[in-house]
Each structure stands twice: as C-alpha cells, then as structure tokens.
Amino acid sequence: MSSKTDTVQGQLIVIAAPSGAGKSSLVNAMLEADPLLSLSISHTTRPMRPGETQGEHYQFVSPDEFREAADNDEFLEHARVFGHWYATSRVSVATALDNGQDIILEIDWQGARQVGQQFPDCCRIFILPPSVKALRERLVKRGQDEPEVIERRMRKARREMEHFHEFDYLVINDQFEQALGELLNITGCMRLRTPIQRRRHQKVLVELLKSQ
C-alpha cells in the first residue's frame, strides 16, 4: 500500500451551468459511475429544502456564520446567487486533494473564475442546454418555482451563458447519456495529462529511461 508521501495530488474539476441545464443530475450520475470522483459540499445561507440533509446536500449556515467564515478567509470562493450566499471550504478541498481525491466543485461561473485564479491547472467544464425552449421547459418541470421566479432564472441564465468561453470544455446537455459520457471522457483524459502521469508513474519512467 502506498504511503501518504506516494499519493499523487488529486485533481480539481469545476463544473458550472445555468440553472435548469441539468448540472446536478449529471454530476450525481458522474459520482455513481466513477468511484474516483467525489463532490465538495458547498456552504449556503439558503433555507433547507424538503428532502435535503445537512452535510450531504449543503452545509447550511446562518448569514452571520457565513460572514464570519468569509472574513476569516475560510472559503476558496463565494458568490451571491438569487439572494443567498454559496461558498466552497478551502480546508476541505485542500485536504481532499492532498489525499489524492479528484474533487468536483459544482459552482457558478463567478466561483469558477475565482477558483481558476487560484488553481490555474484545474479542469473547468461548462454545461449548456440545447435550446432556450428546453431550458424553460426544464425549469417549469422541476415544479420548484413560481412563474415570476422562473422568468428571473431565465434572465439570469442568459447572462450566465455568456461566460462559457472562460471554461476549458463545453458540454451540451441534449441527450443525458451522451452528455454524461462526454463528461466522463473529459475527467478520464484529465488523469492522463503528462504532468500527472509523470508523478504517478515516476518509477516506471525512471526504469524505462535509465541508461542501458
């Protein structure tokens, strides 16, 4: 068994999308399909919804607790979305990466930009719906929001989608299984990048390249 000193640093995967693009469903499917992936649990000040569990879906905190943590620089990124704050714990992400875990951050484009500034080698993926019509249909089908809230989400989605070019990869979620396959292909290729393979297979490379 490898010691901690032999552990290859985990990879950071940032996945963003406008509300209704199917990001959460795709991320959940990725976690089921690939045991090497894990999800960073975000902090939020929004109320817990029916069916959600503290520590599983989010770390639900009060606005005062959130503000104190932000002031203490405990967050890797944080952003205000639809009147509530969301953030990623700096310590939890660093610990997971040091233990060799590949971590998914399911955040918005603002958070992705902040993370990219601190981790320029992270893998950034943006997910888009196939059309504006499909996006609206998905928001309505969820049954979580009143019509005026859906319209607000649509306006925000249009602004968010303008930032797709800031990401390394773009996935169109038209057919779910195809989009899932593309996401898993991206994370698979990410692990084969030369700097990562060089660390992972250092002994093999030394043996192959040593003088005969």
Image (cartoon, rainbow, N blue to C red):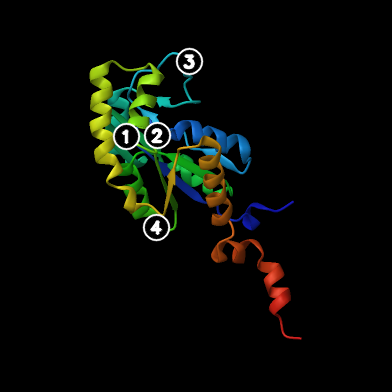
Q: Earlier in the sequence, mark 1 or mark 2?
A: 2
Distance from label 1 to label 4 (Cα)?
31 Å
Q: In what element is the residue under mark 2?
A: loop
Which percent across, then down, holds residue 176?
A: 51, 35
- Observer-nearest of 34 and 7: 34
Please give the residue where the numbered disc 1 appears in the rendered image.
132
Q: Residue placed farthest to the bottom in the image?
A: 212
Residue 196 visible in the shown view: yes
SS state under label 3: loop
Left or right of 188 on screen, residue 67: left
Query: What amino acid is at disc 3?
Result: Gly
**As drawn, 140 above or below 163:** above
Above or below, 140 relative to 94: above
Residue at the spot of label 3: 51
Mark 4 neighbour class, 10 Å CA radius: few under 14, some 14 to 19, many 20 or more: few
The residues tagged by marks 1 and 2 sit, at their Cα atoms, a distance apart of 10 Å
Which label's residue is closer to the chain start, 2 or 3?
2
